[in-house]
Amino acid sequence: SESSERMWHLIRKDTGSIAICNWYLPPGHGVEEIDSLQVELEEISAVADSIILVGDLNTHHVSWLRYSSGDTTRGRRLKDVVEQYGLRQLVSQPTRVG
């Protein structure tokens, strides 16, 4: 990514291709990084059959991200973008204690 701390890898197989993204989203930033994610997802979805997005996203959305401390504009925006591309939240326990 040119505008965010994101790295994309495209793995091509005989059965299709998988795009894997590793992303660090620092706390306290706005929605610009999420908007640029949407642009990148649009581009990568044209060449990848599956997308895996992992990272430390420092985002809160109580009804979507079970262990969040509240709702944020960034959390709401990220939820909209991942739903648009059929991505799912898979973390089933808190990633930090305390």
Image (cartoon, grey):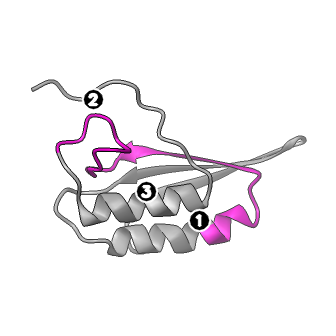
Query: At 50% from the left edge and 63% from the top edge, which residue is drawn?
Result: 81
Q: Tell me which label, 3 or 1, sits earlier in the chain.
A: 1
Tag 3 near tag 1, CB within 8 Å: no
Residue, disc 3 = 79
Callout 2, which amino acid? Thr
Callout 3, which amino acid? Lys
Magenta span: chief secondary structure? loop
Give yes or no for residue 65 being in the magenta stretch.
yes
Q: Residue furthest front?
A: 63
Query: At 54% from the left edge and 74% from the top edge, which residue is drawn?
Result: 39
Which label lies toward us, 3 or 1? 3
Residue, disc 2 = 95
Q: Position of residue 15 (x, y in %)?
A: 88, 41
2 above or below 91?
A: below
Quick one: SS at disc 2?
loop
Label 3 CA crowd tier, 10 Å (few <14, some 14–19, many 20+) = many
Quick one: SS at disc 3?
helix
Which label lies toward us, 2 or 3? 3
Quick one: SS at disc 1?
helix
The magenta segment is 42-69
Callout 1, which amino acid? Leu
Q: Position of residue 56 (x, y in %)?
A: 32, 45
Q: Tell me which label, 2 or 1, sits earlier in the chain.
A: 1
Cα–Cα gap, marks 2 and 3? 19 Å
Tag 2 near tag 3, CB within 8 Å: no
